[in-house]
Image (cartoon, helix red, strand yellow):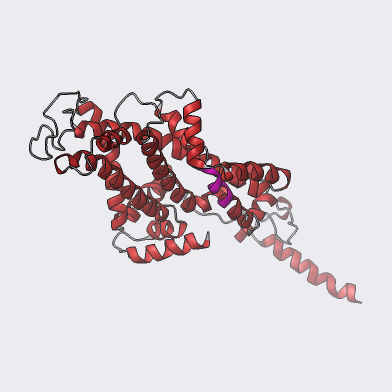
Amino acid sequence: MSDSNDGPDRKDHADALEAIPGRDGSTDADDRVARTDGGNVGVDSPFEVVSSVEETRLDRLRKIYDAYVRAPFLIVWTDWRARIGFTIVFAYLFMGIVGPHIIEPTEVGEAGALAKPFQNWDYPLGTDQMGRDLLSQVVFSTTEILKMVTSGALATVGVGTLVGAIAGYKGGWADTVLSSITDIFINLPGFPTVMVLALLLPIGGNPYVIGILLSIAAWGGLARAIRSQMLTLRSESFVEASRAMGIPNRDIIFKEIVPHLMPFVVINLTNAARRVIFSAVGLYYLGILPFEKLNWGITLNQAYQSGAHYRPGALHWFLVPMIAIIVFSIGLILLGQSLDRVFNPRVRARHEKRSEGGETSGEDDEMSGESMVGGV
């Protein structure tokens, strides 16, 4: 009885489905295949609707420009510390890279001994006891220091980040071996170790080798800190999702996790650069590192040996290299604080989404950056 009653209804329903036009306007039911969800291929489905706007190459370039050029520039421009830090560091980069092509190397007896600063504009910073131009000494010393800072800071951050990231993410025997090596380098007396190696190894006056030598005992602390952060981040949901999708561990570590640690890494980069400067100047001042050209440490040593630190007429000889070291260090500190905000995902996203006429508060960015660093 029920079968006879349902027969006409089913037939009417099938006729109605056949009457629904397909995409090509055809109503032939034989041209449509039934779907597993009860629909038909010929019937429009919301799951088949795609965006009618295709992203062009210009749109992609605009996004890259906004993320990597415009947003960092706005972040730097809205913070007075960033402006000062970048100005100081760029001034030293210009002095160290372009300066030697503009200013001639100084020679003994080039001018009168202990000429005062800003009295003779041929020697604006004055001269030392042997008549050598102090401005020329500062310029050529900056070139050597920049080479040491580049190699030493990059080696410290590179080795520390690599060892800490692998040890914290992999765990097991890899963590045990790398942590043991890290503990050995942490417990080494840093400055005495560098002194002994500088005396034993035939490093010559190569500034890049000296920079790497100065980083030997400096990367251990960073590796331990990165490992601790990695132990926390590896259990996050986005890391678990990456593993579930079969993404290689190498990509998970260096593309997913390490970017979250960039503010911390950048701060340590600037700290490592300052450490290289002070260590190099100290070793040159003590006469341990070999040298072929004058640098800040050698100038301080010669000024101190001549009693320039208590002689009013020679005090500028002692102060010029000291001020150059202090100003460069301050610039690196301010640069590190500003780069912390540049690599902060929250601050970057805020500037990327900001409208052309909108204003962003530098204080709000600063609070957001500090909270992000505290969270890391």
Which x, y percent locates residue 195?
47, 34
Q: Is residue 100 above or below residue 249?
A: above
Could you say where residue 174 lies in the image, as x and y percent from the top left? 69, 43
Q: Can residue 248 be seen?
A: no
| 143 on left or right of 110 | right
Q: Which residue sits at x=46%, y=56%?
A: 345
Q: Is residue 210 left or right of residue 307?
A: right
- Farthest residue in the left direction? 119
The answer to which image quadrant residue 359 occupies is: bottom left
Q: Nearer the viewer, residue 209 or 157?
A: 209
Measured as percent of width and height from the top left, residue 247 is found at: 65, 45
| Residue drawn at x 13%, y 30% as measured from the top left | 113
Query: Which quarter of the picture shows residue 298?
Result: top left
Check if residue 264 falls in the magenta segment.
no
| Residues rendered magenta in the picture | 218-225
| Dominant secondary-structure state across the stretch colored magenta | helix
Q: Is residue 67 left or right of residue 182?
A: left
> Does residue 300 sit above or below 252 in this rendering?
above
* In the image, residue 152 above or below residue 102: below
In front: 33, or 228? Answer: 228
